[in-house]
Image (tube, rainbow, N blue to C red):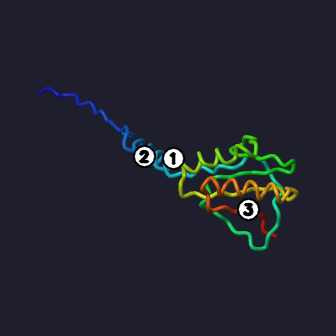
């Protein structure tokens, strides 16, 4: 009687394909659901207000620095161009609001003019950024 030699071939490798599928699906989920914060692109010394509150619904940030320059999406713009840029942003996010981030030393007249351009562009939800004490 001949003996057969039986070779044990253990195939002990783990199939990683299902795990990679799950990881890629989770990655896609987090990318799609992530909110990207747009800021004006300049740091400001905000005024202090005891009634300051957080706003999460704003989609447009307009900054006015200490040198009375207006910033939208990290670009310096003239006062005359604010309305056109805001109208374009309002088309992309029709239900979003706006936040004006103004330095403490900003002239009130310029702040009111920017606020007026926002309202003329169709943005009704406008807030002025402030720090809590």
Mark 1 vs 2: CB contact within 8 A: no
Residue farthest toward the top in the current orientation of the protein:
2
Q: Which residue position is annotated with label 3? A: 128
Task: Classify 21 as above or below 112.
Answer: above
Where does the image place residue 131, in percent across and percent down from the top left?
Answer: 78, 64
| Badge 3 density bin: few <14, some 14–19, many ≥20, Cα 10 Å | some
Write down the residue under mark 1.
31
Could you say which quadrant of the image residue 106 lies in?
Answer: bottom right
**Residue 124 x, y percent position in the rendering:** 62, 61
Which label sits in the foreground, 3 or 2? 3
Residue plotted at (82% across, 70% down): 133
Q: Is residue 73 left or right of residue 103?
A: left
Mark 2 residue crowding within 10 angstroms, few (<14) / some (14–19) / many (20+): few
Return the x and y of residue 14 as percentages of the image width and height: 37, 40
Dot 1 lies on which element? helix
Residue at x-position 57% and y-position 57%: 96
Measured Cα–Cα span from mark 3 to mark 2: 39 Å
Mark 3 in CB contact with mark 2 (< 8 angstroms): no
Residue picked out by circle 2? 25
Q: Name the one closer to the observer, 15 or 9.
A: 15
Which residue occupies 84% across, 49% down? 68
| Alpha carbon separation for disc pair 1 and 2 | 10 Å
Which mark's residue is nearer the viewer, 1 or 3?
Answer: 3
First along the sequence among labels 1 and 2: 2
- The earlier-in-sequence mark between 1 and 3 is 1
Which of the pair 120/106 is nearer the observer? 120
Q: How far from the left and from the top, in percent, is residue 123?
A: 61, 57
Q: Count every numbered label the image shows and give the total.
A: 3
Q: Secondary structure at mark 2?
A: helix
The quarter of the image holding the N terminus is top left
Q: Closer to the N terminus: mark 3 or mark 2?
A: 2
């Amino acid at each position: 009687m001949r003996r057969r030699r039986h070779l044990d071939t253990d195939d002990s490798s783990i199939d990683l394909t299902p795990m990679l599928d799950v990881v890629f699906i989770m990655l896609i989920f987090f990318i799609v659901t992530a909110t990207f914060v747009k800021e004006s692109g300049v740091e400001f010394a905000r005024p202090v207000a005891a009634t300051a509150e957080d706003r999460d619904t704003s989609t447009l940030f307009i900054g006015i620095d200490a040198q009375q320059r207006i910033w939208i999406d990290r670009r310096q713009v003239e006062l005359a161009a604010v309305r056109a840029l805001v109208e374009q942003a309002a088309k992309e996010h029709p239900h979003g609001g706006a936040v004006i981030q103004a330095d403490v030393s900003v002239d009130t007249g310029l702040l009111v003019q920017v606020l007026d351009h926002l309202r003329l562009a169709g943005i009704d939800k406008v807030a002025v950024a402030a720090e809590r004490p």
